[in-house]
Image (tube, rainbow, N blue to C red):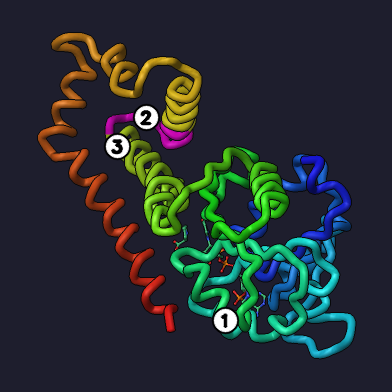
């Protein structure tokens, strides 16, 4: 965290992912006055200002209120807009980049394509975070080309670790797999919770009670898996009494090819990430 002390951090795009990362940063004691966000939504800017975060309107065309203002004063610029609008968005400020570390959280968009969009600017680290960053329980994959300095890699890791775990990948393509296993994955767990709660309600619990039990179980299982020396398969075996209730549930999942279902979903995620990469390449 020492690396972030006094650093000016700007976010281009103040939507879901940016807000999650900002909450992580503020939760770790970063002064909101060191954070600037450019977002066209007045509602988002007003919310940010209430939290003492600077907010500018990228569509404004004044000397004090636009994305160039956010970028010029920054040490780190986090690009948090949809990959499909990145080219258009960065064209507003690419010319004023000179020393800033750019961190892109955009799914799929390669360093090479982004660098071209930025007129050849190369000081880029790619990150694939996830929304539990909001409560500092995020998981982020990071990639930097070999020409990025150790100081900038440390700065990027420090910024993302304010929101939770960080893990570097050696090859840029591995970020597709990171997206499948953690970037998009909170949604899989939320979907599983939704399905479990619906099923418990059908079995006779009221929805609040079902939700509380399912969510606490997800939290407990995740924390156990993280802290235990035993692998998830062994922890699963310890719940599963021979010919008991868990065995019946697990056998049902196996008959329905649960592992295959999960593999197929993660492959769809990986493939979509590759497609976005190809769509945005020149
Ligand atoms: N959500 C997630 O879980 C994750 C997202 N990501 C990546 O994060 C990025 C953002 O995703 P997410 O936060 O979900 O998307 P959101 O749509 O929530 O946020 C993007 C924000 O950027 C704003 N925006 C549009 N144009 C500009 C502009 N010219 N200047 C500044 N801001 C602009 C949008 O405004 P408006 O809506 O008014 O156009 C919107 O508020 C994506 O690239 C995504 O791949 C990565 C990991 C996880
Ligand atoms: O769905 C998406 O494309 C983004 C990237 C990872 C999570 N959300």
> CB atoms at circles 1 and 3 under 8 Å apart?
no
Identify the residue position indicated by label 1 in the image: 117
Q: Nearer the viewer, mark 2 or mark 1?
A: 1
Identify the residue position indicated by label 3 in the image: 199
Residue 205 is labelled as: 2
Q: Quadrant of the C terminus?
A: bottom left
Query: Element under label 3?
Result: helix
Classify mark 1: residues with Cα within 10 Å, few (<14), some (14-19) or many (20+). Answer: many
Task: Choose between 50 and 113: the one closer to the eye.
Answer: 113
Residue 201 is labelled as: none
**Is 15 placed above or below 97 here?**
above
**Is 83 placed above or below 169 here?**
below
Task: Choose between 101 and 251: the one closer to the eye.
Answer: 101
Classify residue 66 by image quadrant.
bottom right
Classify residue 240 by image quadrant.
top left
Residue 85 in picture, x, y percent from top left: 54, 79
- Residue 208 colored in magenta in the image: yes
Residue 43 in picture, x, y percent from top left: 72, 70
User: What's the distance in space between the residues labelled 2 and 1, CA to CA?
Assistant: 53 Å
Q: Is residue 23 visible?
A: no
**Is 77 placed above or below 5 here?**
below
Classify mark 2: residues with Cα within 10 Å, few (<14), some (14-19) or many (20+). Answer: some
> In terms of sequence position, does the residue under pointer 1 or pointer 3 come before the other?
1
Query: Element under label 2?
Result: loop
Q: Which stretch is magenta?
A: 203-211
In the image, farthest residue toward the left: 255
Q: Nearer the viewer, mark 1 or mark 3?
A: 1
**Residue visible at 59% across and 70% down in the picture:** 81
């Amino acid at each position: 965290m020492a690396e972030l002390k006094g650093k000016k951090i700007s976010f281009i795009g103040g939507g879901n992912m940016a807000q999650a990362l900002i909450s992580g940063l503020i939760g770790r004691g970063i002064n909101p006055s060191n954070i600037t966000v450019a977002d066209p939504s007045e509602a988002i800017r007003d919310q940010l200002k209430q939290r003492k975060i600077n907010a500018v309107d990228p569509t404004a065309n004044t000397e004090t209120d636009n994305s160039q203002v956010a970028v010029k004063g920054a040490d780190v610029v986090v690009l948090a807009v949809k990959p499909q609008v990145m080219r258009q968005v960065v064209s507003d400020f690419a010319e004023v980049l000179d020393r800033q570390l750019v961190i892109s959280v955009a799914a799929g968009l390669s360093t090479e394509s982004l660098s071209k969009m930025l007129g050849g600017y190369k000081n880029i680290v790619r990150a694939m975070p996830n929304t539990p960053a909001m409560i500092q329980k995020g998981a982020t994959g990071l990639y930097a080309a070999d020409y990025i300095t150790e100081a900038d890699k440390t700065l990027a890791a420090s910024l993302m670790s304010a929101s939770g775990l960080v893990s570097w990948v050696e090859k840029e393509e591995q970020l597709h797999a990171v997206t499948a296993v953690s970037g998009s994955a909170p949604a899989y767990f939320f979907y599983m919770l939704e399905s479990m709660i619906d099923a418990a309600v059908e079995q006779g619990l009221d929805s609040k009670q079902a939700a509380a039990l399912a969510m606490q179980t997800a939290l407990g299982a995740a924390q156990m898996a993280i802290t235990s020396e035993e692998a998830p398969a062994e922890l699963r075996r310890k719940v599963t009494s021979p010919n008991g209730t868990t065995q019946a549930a697990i056998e049902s999942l196996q008959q329905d090819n649960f592992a295959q279902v999960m593999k197929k979903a993660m492959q769809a995620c990986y493939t979509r990430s590759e497609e976005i990469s190809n769509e945005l390449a020149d």
